[in-house]
Image: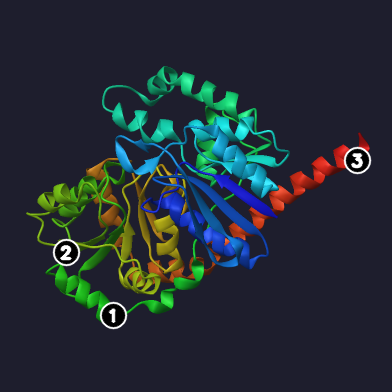
Amino acid sequence: MRIVDVNEFYSPTGGGVRSYLDRKMALMSELGHQQIVIAPGREDLVEERPGGARIHYVKSPGIPFDSNYGLFWDAAPVHALLDHYRPDVVENCAPWRSAAIVAEWQGDALRSWFMHNDNLETYPKRWFARVASEATIERAFGWYDRYMNRWLDKFDTVVTNGPVLTERLRARGIRVDETMTLGIEREHFSPALRSATLRAAMLEQCGLPEDAFLLIGVGRHHPEKRWPMVIDAVRRAGAKLPVGLVLLGLGPDTRTLERHIAESPHVRMFQPIYHRGQLASIMASADALVHGCDTETFGLVASEALASGLPLIVPDRGGAAAVPKPEYGAWFRSGDAYDCARAIVALASRDKKLLHRAAAIAAPKVWSDREHAQALIAHYQALIDARATVSRSA
């Protein structure tokens, strides 16, 4: 099977979508299929990947407010590439120019809209949360949901990356056909990587003894991650018990966060860890993950932490909320530093051996990216077979 993803969210300096597709290209090749990505670029360029995968950049204008990404403009070069590659499946994930380009292409491939995010949740609901209720914001932006459904009607299948996104979209009347829950590179993460020496070293960095409670936070320094709220919660929890926080990440808010932790002696920030083995060891050696983002549609970091045998402290909405169970997790009201502090104290006060034992039992059950890819291929193949059956009987 050859899948071509016309993707305006892919960029060499992008985030989750880039990581997902880079890994998917490798997995598809291993499974005997071919994944090609057509993406906006600063110049026309082909980047070959192992196993026949490739990224074909089409020279396109950039986005003024985010230099990492571009938008397609002219449909002709993208249509020419689709004609050349003759895919079995064409994927789209953005509601902008790529939606029209894929929908209007004259080829006979299966058209799939793969939902990675929900723009209404990520932007308007966050921007206007302090001045309007969620229901009011949804009514005000009902035009966006109608716009989405008009485009989705032109696609053969609409899939989401997890149950949280499916539930959220269906509640607003947006079409979803299948839930294809994302997975993680599970082979890198394990509770067996827990190191008492590494844990002690991280606590020392936080200025705390070994009997303190060590939290880890992983993610970009971006407003949607709500790191200031998490830092405030850790500071408040620290008034009741010794607790430290190690933050791994980088982003546009890094300087702001540096100022925010200036008076927090037990919070430390470090650069992102890109080596999967090192990140897995650090995760496994903490006492719990704390996560503030409530707009993500899939709890990638929370899933990696659980695969490392780590208890979880997460908001009560968003992709991360679906990852923990009561045996090894605690939830707090989204965006509420006081309630997050309460959740930290509640989890830290529980029997740590029982917490880690429960998380370790759940760790091997975390869905892998290979399982996700296999399920997605099976879904596409079933639709292709059904279409062929209808064609033969016509």
Residue that mark 1 sits on: 196
Mark 2 falls on what kind of element? loop
Asked whether disc 1 touches disc 2, contact meaning CB atoms under 8 Å apart, the reply is: no
Q: Residue at x 31, y 48 (%)?
A: 292
Tag nearer the camera, 3 or 1: 3
314, above or below 52, in the image:
above
Measure the alpha-carbon separation of dots 1 and 2.
18 Å
Give the residue displayed 42% in from the left and 43% down from the top. 318
Q: Residue at x 69, y 36 (%)?
A: 156
Would you say 330 lies left or right of 53 here?
left
Q: Specify whether 319 is left or right of 236.
A: right
Q: Secondary structure at mark 3?
A: helix
Residue 239, how many percent across, how many down?
13, 55
The mark lying in front, picked from 3 and 2, is 3
Residue underneath mark 3: 392
Residue type (three-letter) at the residue carrying disc 1 = Ala
- For label 1, count other residues whose C-alpha is less than 10 Å away and answer few (under 14), some (14-19) or many (20+): few
Q: In the rendered structure, find residue 242 and report the number of the disc placed on it.
A: 2
Number of residue marks: 3
Quadrant housing the C terminus:
top right
Of the 4 image quadrants, the one containing the N terminus is bottom right
